[in-house]
Image (spheres, helix red, strand yellow):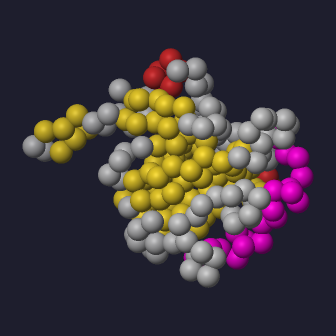
Amino acid sequence: MIDIRSTAIPEVKLLVPGKIGDARGFLSEVYKKSELEAAGLFLDFVQENHLSSQRAGTIRGLHFQRPPHAQDKLVRVLRGRILDVAVDLRRSSPTYGRHVAEELSAENWRQLLIPKGFAHGLCTLEPHTEVIYKATNYYAPECDRGLKWDDPDLGIAWPIDESQACLSDSDRRHPRLRELPVFFD
């Protein structure tokens, strides 16, 4: 069974799969379409990505794909810990520009469901962290966009300062929220 919980932004969901264990280890149904549908979440995942970050303090994001290739994402950690962040980019939303931040780890077994219209980013809290996420649309480089991870207007309490953050060059160049065109109404 998967416990599906709302967050401060109701469209962003925290999923906590149950585990059945014995002396051999455990079994966990980490994704079950029928349970999500029973909760009103009708998603068709078409791609799964696996990422590895060697250093604690690695920042990835804030990323999103604009329409027509926008993606819902279901994020979970296989090894290590992350601070996972979703920022609302839906201009007409009452939570526009607000974010949800949740710690996901191999230990707490929680997953974050990030809907279309949100930017997604993460910060690794331990070295050698591995993350898997499912997406409801294929990666489309022409629709790949980003938002500045440390935009002060967002107020994200990242657990690392810019001088210690390990980022890609492209992630350092993303625009601030106030400079971002409207991609989601």
Residue 12 image position (x, y, % from top left): 60, 37
Q: Is residue 181 above or below residue 124?
A: above
Q: Residue furthest left?
A: 23
126 magenta-colored: no
Q: Position of residue 63 (x, y in %)?
A: 69, 56
**Residue located 13% across and 44% down the image:** 24
Count how many numbered circles sit on residues in the image.
Answer: 0
Which quadrant: the C terminus?
top right
Q: Quadrant of residue 171?
A: bottom right
**Residue visible at 78% across and 35% down?**
94
- Residue 70 visible to an observer of this rendering: no
The image quadrant that residue 176 belongs to is bottom right
Q: Position of residue 134 (x, y in %)?
A: 54, 44
Q: Is residue 31 left or right of residue 9?
A: left
Q: Relative to residue 18, is residue 24 depicted above or below?
A: below
Rendered residue at 40%/37% (across/down): 16
On the question of residue 112 being in view, the answer is: yes
User: What segment carries the magenta color?
Assistant: 166-184
Residue farthest bottom in this picture? 163
Indicate the quadrant containing the N terminus: top left, top right, bottom left or bottom right: top left
Return the residue nearer the eye: 170 or 56.
56
Q: Main secondary structure of the magenta part?
A: loop
User: Is the residue 89 above or below the residue 60 in the image?
Assistant: above
| Residue 170 among those drawn in magenta | yes
What's the residue at 58%, 25% (across, down)?
Answer: 41
Percent across and percent down for residue 104 are 44, 51
Along the viewing direction, whichever of 148 and 30 lies nearer the viewer: 148
